[in-house]
Every structure is written in structure tokens, then in C-alpha cells.
Amino acid sequence: MIRVLITGTLLAALALPHAGAATPSPLVRAVQAQEKVAYAGEQIVLTWLGSTVDVALVRIERDPSRQTRLEYTPVGSSRRLNVLLQNGMEIRYDPVKQRGTRTTRPVFEDQLDEMFLTTHLPLLLANYDISVSSGRVLGRDVDVVTLSPHSRDRPTRRMAIDRETGVILRSERILPDGRLAQVTAFLSFAVMPKGWLDKARPPAHVHLREVPPLRQVTLSEAARLLGRPPVRVIPPEGFTPIAYYLTPGREPILQAVYSDGLSVLLLTYRRGAVPRPPRGSHAVPGRNGPIWVLPMGLRNLVHWSYGGWLLTVVGEVSTDSLVRAAERTGVSPSPRVWDQLLAWLRHLRTLVQRT
Amino acid sequence: MQEHPSDQLTAYVDGELTLEEAAEVAAHLAECAHCREVVSDLRAVQTLLRSLPEPSPDPSLLLRARERVESVLARKPRLSRWLIAGAVSFAVLTFVALVPLSPPPGSHEAGAVWHFRHHAQLASAHPLSDVTLASYLSSPLPYDTLEEAVLSRETP
Amino acid sequence: MGESGTIAASGSMQEADQADQFATLIAENWHRLYRFAYHLTRSREEAEDLLQQAAEEAFKAFHRFRPGTRFDRWLMRILYTTLIDQVRKERRRKVFELDSLPLSALQAGDASDPEAAVEGSLDGPVRRALDALPPEFRAVVVLVDIEGLSYVEAADVLGCPVGTVRSRLHRGRLALREWLRPYVDALKRGDL
């Protein structure tokens, strides 16, 4: 039933004419490439903060369903980072300090395109405009896909997607005022045959600490474990809650994850009355008290307290938008999802009454 | 002296005997007032039980049962799914489930970095995310470089 | 802020489909399942707890359910086994003998008040008599006399031989007869 609904939405969305729009097939190919294409290359990762920019070079060797190896060399620093991603396991370590962590992650590579088509893409279509043009990167033909948000408080994403393989060769995030905030780009790229990587292991003398994964919970479980239901926060336009995680311990922390189809917002709840503003943040007067703001260019952090909760939100959204969300804490609008739930319940009762 | 059928009387009342067995019981009943009483009692008890009113469940119970069921799904260490606006059912949206970062934000100093790292980890769940970027931003590396700018309160 | 109950995790589209199917089946059989849980337990709260617990167990075992077969019976079995597990944990190894259950399991007032029956408030005494039965006996009586199952069907749900259904049913009904003696007599006389 859901598939029909979703496919219907998708088809309807695709049928609408946009100026300069094309079918999102480069996006779909980009998603499919993640599980299909093996490659080796070097990337540069640039992150702007005002006039400061952080630069790192990454050597990447990828063989889907086998292993992905990343070796980071931040420019202007002696620190190093190696990452091994392999079918459910992530190992990251500093090869110089010989220390690192190991954790398990879920395997989802074989379902990525279905997930994307049925879940991410509809939300994305609802919140972004898509336009496609042609280009060339590294001597290869690419589709340049631009995702422009309807809401002017978040970045535009531009991707150069290799026409032959679907690999994203270059990815940019551009702030609403037109400034570049983040670039990830291949400096060299070579397609490799699948199966080319044998499974590497970190050197024996590297000490790895096991990191337990966070626990995913339902909202009601979280309410139970925290002692009361978390206060309602209305996120910026287009964001929908998608998951909740709990950090257990003496002081449980709830992480609520929101998405608008492309971008992720993280809202963290802790019990407490006295705000703990992070270093470097400054306070702005809010309706219910001060709100601390820490702008980091692309991703911003906002912290405030409300009704015995300490709340922190991080997202690729402007500080203004996040502050507005903070001010709307505790306000109860008519939550769409709740109405849908009640409608479902009523529908089920009529079903039951008929039997 | 004939033995009185016991269980068989109940089965007789419910029509759960074979024709042969039922005929035997009927023959016995014709001659046994005691067993006739029992049969009559059994039927009366049945009537009383069937007269109980239909109980009605609390309207929120179905919803609570659903939450219990969903908690089963939540305990599995796999993906989570998203709720599409307009879709009403158990179906949920897909998302990465596990965030392998552990210590909670302790001091104020560590606080912001912890949040940014977690955010990066979760953002990596999106199929269009950059593999390299996610792993990089969820490590402490970039924050060393940016810390100075942050501390000098530079705003972009 | 997010709303409860709508967000959950599942491993695949297939698992969400399973959850959809399960939800539909539960909803279609909801009243029947609630009635069974209600009569199996001693209070509304216990019924709700039992039903929720059983729903969770049932969903975990849903891969074992053969589509096209009776979902209500399948879940009733799980309700029953869940209840029995709970009861076994609570019991302190006391073996219930039906004959030894005191008549005072019923409140004296009910037993001697056929007037109440005439006014139509039979529910109280009958319900209490049913509650007084040990769960194994109560389950059989409920399945056959209230849910209308045949012996074979009841045996399926309870996971016991048909002969056991028959003997438990008989003894259960006879016990109820004792506890509801005034009403039984009134019925037979034609007063009810």
C-alpha cells in the first residue's frame, strides 16, 4: 500500500514541469554507484569558516561489499586518520599515535537505491528544486545536479555526477548568500574492477577501543527512560523527525534526528535547568530566555534551556532559523503526523467494526 | 451397574461425540435422572457464559499495542525508516541506525565538538552523502583547525 | 517535536511490509482478541497488559505465521501461552485442584442474590466465577463457550490433546455450576 502511495507521489512530482528540470536519474545513478562502482583516487576536502578554511587530502580506495579505505592528511597538521569501512564494521585510527576505535554499523549498501527512491527522494522533491546541466570534471563527462532549497535558510548542493559510473566526482555546498562553504572533490580518479581490494586490517600494534553503538528508541521508550516526554520543538520548515537515539548512562541523552530529504538536523535533549553554553558561543535574547548561538559557517549550533530540558540543535541551517525553532519550544501546533496517527486509528476501528 | 459418563456428557452437550458415542449417551440419559440433571446444568452454565456482555477495549489500546510492536523493530540493530507525510501505517523512513560515538558531552569545551561529530555521523546516512566528508567531520581533526577561529568569536 | 509511535526502525522494506501486514491483521481481529484477553484475565488492566505483551511476542514470531491461516487463532494461542508463562512465574508451585477451590472464591452476596440476576446484572457473578477458575480451565471454557471454537480448534490454540480439552471443559463447567448454583437453578426453573 505504501509503495503505491510513494510511487504515486514520485510520478506526480516527476510529471510537474520545472524550468530547466530533468528527471532525477543522475541522482539515482549516484546512489546506485555506491554499491556498484569500485575505484581508487585522491580527494580534497575543504571546509570554510569565515576567512578560515580547513583543508584535508584523502586517499580513497573503495570496493563495495568488500572494503573502503580512507587515509586522511589534514594540511598544516601532523595529525593523521585512517578509516576502514567493511560490511558492518568501522575502524578508525591514528597511524602515528597508534590508537583508535572499532564499532559496528548496519549493512545497508544493498538497499540504498530502493531506500532512496521510496524515502529520501520524495522528501527531497518536496523541499528542493532540482536542475541538471552538463559539464566536464577530470576529463570525464558529468551531469551537474543542483539542489536548491525552497527554504532560504539552508545551503544549495551542487554535485558533478560522472555520467559513466554515477560516482559523485565533486560536491559543493553553497550558502544562501552565494559563498562556498564546503567542497569535496576528486583530484584523481580511476575506476577499478570489483574485487580488487583484499580486506586490509589495521597494523597489529594499533590499540583499538570498542565503541558500543547508540541505541535507537521510540519516542515513548525515550520518554520512559528520561522520566518524562521530551518537550516539543518545531523544526525549521520541511524537516521531519526520522529517528531517536539514546545515550544511556547516569545521565541519559536523547538525540532526535530530523531530515528534509537532503540535510540532517540533530536535536539533543538532556535533563537540566542550567544551560551549558559551548565555548565560543554568544547569547541572543529569546522569548523564553537567552539562546546561545555558535555559528560554524555551514553547520550551526544553538543551545537553550526550557522546562527542565537542556536542548542543543546542530544543522546545516542558518542560525536565525535555529533560533526561531528554539523560541517555538513548547508551542503546540497541530502536528501533522499526530493527526495522521489518529486518522489511522479511526480507519482501523471502522475496519474492525465491519468484521 | 452402569458407570455414569462424565466428560462425555460435556461432549454430548457440545455435539462433539461420534454418532455411535452419542447414541450410547442418549441411551444412558433415558434411564438416568442424575445425568439428565448434569446435562441440564451444563447447558445452563453455557447460557450464563454466553450472556456475558461484549467487552470494549480502551480506544488507546491499539495504539499502545502498536508502539510495543514497533519497539520490537527498534531493538533490532538495523536501519530505521522515515514516515512519509500522508502515508498512514507502520511504514517508516529509512535511515542509518547506529551512531558509533560514545562519551556524552562533558565539559563545555568538548560539548560543541561532540554535537558536530554526531551530526556528521548521522548525516552520513544519506545515500548522497560524501563518504570521505562524513568520516572526516565525525572525527576530531577538523575541529582542531577551526577551534581558534571559534574561540576568537569570528562570525562568518 | 516528533510524535510517538510513528517512528521505528526496521531492517528493510520487507520488514516494514511485515509490520504493515501484522498491523492490519491485528486491527481486523482486534475485538475478538481483546475479548479473549479480557476473559482470560482478571481485570481490564491485566487484559491490556496481556494483549500488548502478546502482540510483541507475536510480532517477533510473525515469520512463523502461515498467511491464509487463521490469524486470530494463532494470536489467541500466543495470548494463552503468554498468560500461562506469567501465571507459572507467579505461582508458588501450588497445584490447583478444582474440588478444593472454596466456594468463598465468590463473594457470598452474589451467590445468594438471584434477584440481581433478574435485573440483568448477571455479569458480575458470572465474571467472578470465571475469574475464580485456574487459567488452564478458564481458557478452555472461554474458547468453547464464549469464542465458540470446536474441541479440535480449542486443542490447537491451547496446544493440548482433544481429550484434555474435553476433560478440562467438563470440570470447569462443573465448578462454575457450583459457584453459580442459584443462577443455574433459576435458569432451569425458567425464572431467568
Image: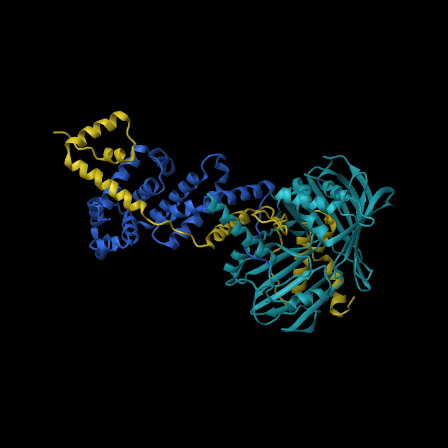
Chain colours: A cyan, B yellow, C blue
Location of residue B27 by image quarter: top left
Give coordinates of residue A147: x percent, y percent. 77, 52
Residue found farthest to the top: B20
Give coordinates of residue A1: x percent, y percent. 60, 42
The front one of B28 and B138 is B28
Q: Residue at left 78%, top 37%?
A: A192
Q: Residue at left 38%, top 51%?
A: B55
B11 on left or right of A332 = left
Give coordinates of residue C146: x percent, y percent. 34, 43
The front one of A254 and B94 is B94
Looking at the figure, which quarter contains the C terminus of chain B?
bottom right
C106 on left or right of C52 = left
Q: Residue at left 69%, top 73%?
A: A283
Residue A203 seen from this side: no
Residue found farthest to the front: C190
Looking at the figure, which quarter contains the N terminus of chain B?
top left
Residue A52 seen from this side: yes
- Number of disc labels: 0
Give coordinates of residue A302: x percent, y percent. 67, 66
Relative height, residue C160 to residue B150 (above, below): above
